[in-house]
Image (cartoon, rainbow, N blue to C red):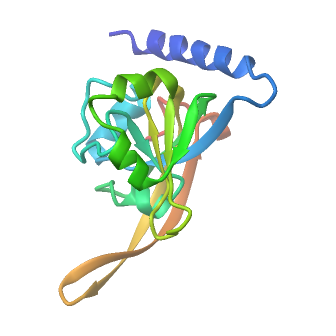
Amino acid sequence: MDYHYKYLKYKNKYSQLKNIIKGGTIKEFIAYHGTDEKNIPSIFLNGFDPKIKSGYGSIFGSGVYLTPDLKYASTYSDCDKVLICKIITDKYITVTQHFAQSHFNKKNYDEIKSKYDLIIVEDQNDKNIPVEYVCLDYTKVKVIGLKIIEKIIEEHDYQENLVDVKTIDCKIIGENGLTKENIFL
């Protein structure tokens, strides 16, 4: 499979989408994606694949799950890395977690996907619930970097609790000569 061709095709599509911004209707979101370490190189080089299902479930339907909350994203990572992603879309909706759980299901998934590329799930009344981005159109998510983290864990009564996340290094494609191919070196 020619991954370089796929990358150029995706890059061209991304550039075209970015060039049609009119009146601020298209919005960019930066978010983190936590995943198992074995998945990181493939996602980095090939992007997200709609045929590959997450091992963590899909409470709001099929899509790429991201969050602006680094600590929350790190709970889905089995290593010291999370992906930094950019979402560009003009078709998004912001809903509460309760609304999403009660209204988004397999029966109306195609209808929702035809209207929106991105569902932003947040609860203004409960700041303890992290914001989640569910990107229904996989082509709208671009991996732009890798964050190396240190998870700060405390043990209480033989139970581990994630207390905080500290950034050790942040590698962004295009900065300091980094490319998708050499970012892991």
Q: Is residue 67 above or below residue 38?
A: below
Q: What is the x, y in percent for residue 15?
A: 66, 18
Q: What is the x, y in percent for residue 73?
A: 42, 55
Q: What is the x, y in percent for residue 80?
A: 38, 58
Q: Determine the image quadrant of residue 94.
A: top right
Horizontal relation, residue 46 to residue 140: left or right: left
Relative to the observer, which residue lies in front, 171 or 113?
113
Residue visible at 60% across and 13% down in the picture: 12
Q: In this view, does 65 lie above or below 123?
A: above
Asked whether the viewer can see residue 149, the reply is yes
Q: What is the x, y in percent for residue 164?
A: 45, 73
Residue visible at 73% across and 29% down in the picture: 25
The image shows a total of numbered marks equal to 0
Q: In this view, does 22 lie above or below 5?
A: below
Relative to the observer, which residue lies in front, 71 or 40?
71
Horizontal relation, residue 152 to residue 183: left or right: left
Q: Determine the image quadrant of residue 86.
A: top right
